[in-house]
Image (cartoon, grey):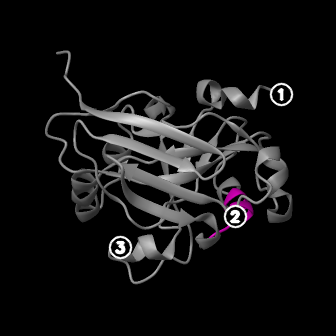
Amino acid sequence: MVDAKKFIEFGKKIIAIGKNYEAHAREMGAASAPKDPVLFIKPTSSYLRNGGSVLLPPGIGEVHHEVELGVVIGKGGKDIAEKDSMDHVAGYALAIDMTARDLQAKAKKAGLPWTHAKGLDTFTPISDFIPKEAVPSPHDLNLWLKVDNELRQNGNTSDMVHSIPFLISYVSRIMTLEEGDLLITGTPEGVGPVPPKSIITAGITGLVDVRFPVETREYKA
């Protein structure tokens, strides 16, 4: 078994869950959260370690923050029973799903994937690994995020529509989960724009804090 603390280095995929909090689904224009989980994949090249700079390409339009609880898979599997799901969890991390909202809206309108909007380099800021043993109640964690010290998001994982065991089981029926994969479980309400030269701070109360400056990326060619 590989060292789960190094999931950022060896994990093969980031599986993201959309609209897994009712209030966020409504703020995005939906009447309610969808009955079935909404899945999309982010590349592991989008990881950004604590303290690194979120880079916004020129002309990207509005980019939003989405603070989320990440679940680190410690034991792979396919068709995992919901009752066995937590046996496959090695630990957790705080993740921020950065989203180019204008690009996403354009893709949605055209019926296209969200890859460009979600998969840019530095668009998954991530905390260090949090061992499973340090989190006795993953469905009762306070997630918060500030931009330039303005509190934007402050929610609790108890408000998830679909639980962590259900999501692990559900995803494993679609694709094989592998050691080091990260499942990000959706964001509470309060998403909003992040301008260049701002500072994002976020955390899981009592467990971890992170800080990410936001800068404009300069193309090399």
Q: Earlier in the sequence, mark 3 or mark 2?
A: 3
Q: Which residues are magenta?
A: 162-169
Provide the residue designation for mark 1.
1
Q: Residue at x 73, y 36 (%)?
A: 179
60 to the left or right of 180: left
Q: Position of residue 99 (x, y in %)?
A: 34, 49
Indicate yes or no whether the magenta region holds residue 163.
yes
Mark 2 vs mark 1, foreground winner is 2
CA gap, disc 2 and disc 1: 26 Å
Residue 188 versus residue 201: which sits nearer the camera?
201
Q: Position of residue 6 (x, y in %)?
A: 67, 26
The quadrant of the image that shows the C terminus is top left
Q: Residue at x 55, y 57 (%)?
A: 143
Q: Position of residue 100 (x, y in %)?
A: 28, 48
Q: Is residue 40 above or below residue 3?
A: below
The quadrant of the image that shows the N terminus is top right
Provide the residue designation for mark 2.
139
Q: Residues within 10 Å of mark 1 (few under 14, many from 20)?
A: few
CA gap, disc 3 and disc 2: 22 Å
Q: Earlier in the sequence, mark 2 or mark 1?
A: 1
Residue 198 versus residue 7: which sits nearer the camera?
198
Would you say the residues marked 3 and 2 are in contact, meaning their CB atoms lie under 8 Å apart? Answer: no
Provide the residue designation for mark 3.
27
Q: Secondary structure at mark 2?
A: loop
Q: Main secondary structure of the magenta part?
A: helix
Q: Residue at x 50, y 31 (%)?
A: 50
For badge 3, the amino acid type reads Glu
